[in-house]
Amino acid sequence: MNDPARDRAALVDRLRSRERLDDERVLDALETVPRHEFVPEERRDRAYVDSPLPIGEEQTISAPHMVAIMATLLELQPGDRVLEIGTGCGYHAAVTAELVGAENVYSVEYHDSLAQAARERLAATGYGDVSVRPGDGKQGWADHAPYDRAYLTCAAPEFPRAVVEQTRPGGLVLAPIGNGRQRLVRARRRADGSLERETHGAVRFVPLQ
Ligand code: SAH
């Protein structure tokens, strides 16, 4: 790869022509975050192809269009406090950080090794203020609740109860929901804790552990 910034801009141009990918703030964030720094060295030549890639521990970094769709659906604004379940390599967290500010992003990763590597990579790429904790995301991260937004980057049978409870009334939660076949579901948390759901497209994510 000779010029990562040029390859990245070309990728973003391709994404812009896709349906729903018209949020310029989100596209700017994708154009800013150096995805090639987050993928394993031997996969770098594919960093700006719009596809998922293996990142170790049988996990994958999501395709750029999926990160863009999720960021758009979450309607992220500067200053929003965001909970991410499934840090993986940290790329999606970095995109979220571009939109809300790194200090407002809290991410939980099941695998210690991935959490540690993501923390180091985020620091090396200028997103060191993103907080990463190894642990089970089904418990959310109560210490920093309430969140304005929460999302899962792994598929769950249902929104984890703790994650919903840690989202403020009026806040949004987003996740791939389903066993095997999954749909991207966005829900607004009502004051009584119930969810106003909206189902989006069919997706394929690794399962929540
Ligand atoms: N957002 C990531 C995508 C990672 S794939 C990126 O940009 O790279 C989904 C991640 O969810 C994997 O890293 C997996 O280890 C993690 N995961 C699975 N179950 C989890 C759980 N119960 N709690 C926290 N993380 C979990």
Image: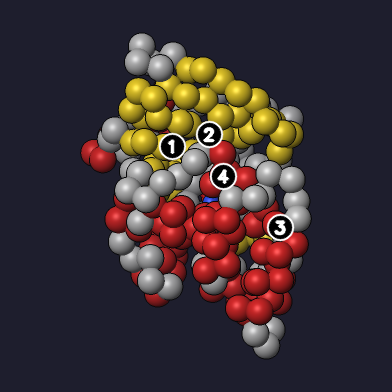
Amino acid residing under circle 4:
Thr
Q: Quadrant of residue 2?
A: bottom right
Mark 3 vs mark 1, foreground winner is: 3
The answer to whether 150 is drawn above or below residue 116 in the figure is above
Q: Would you say 2 lies left or right of 101 here? A: right
> Do the CB atoms of the residues marked 2 and 1 lie less than 8 Å apart?
yes
Amino acid residing under circle 2:
Leu
Q: Position of residue 115 (x, y in %)?
A: 42, 56
Which mark, by number, is residue 174?
A: 2
Residue at (57, 67) in percent of width and height: 31
Kindly identify which residue carries mark 1: 150
The answer to whether 171 is drawn above or below residue 136 in the figure is above
> Do the CB atoms of the residues marked 3 and 1 lie less than 8 Å apart?
no
**What separation in Å lies between label 2 and label 3 (alpha carbons)?**
21 Å
CB at disc 4 and ligand 1 closer than 8 Å? no
Amino acid residing under circle 1:
Ala
**What separation in Å lies between label 1 and label 4 (alpha carbons)?**
13 Å
Give the mark nearest the N terminus, 3 or 1: 3
Check disc 3 and report its element: helix, strand or loop. Answer: helix
Residue at (43, 37) in percent of width and height: 150
Within 10 Å of disc 1 (Cα), the crowding (few <14, some 14-19, many 20+) is many
Mark 1 vs mark 4, foreground winner is: 4
- Foreground residue among 84 and 110: 84
> Do the CB atoms of the residues marked 4 and 2 lie less than 8 Å apart?
no
Give the mark nearest the N terminus, 1 or 4: 4
Which mark, by number, is residue 15?
A: 3
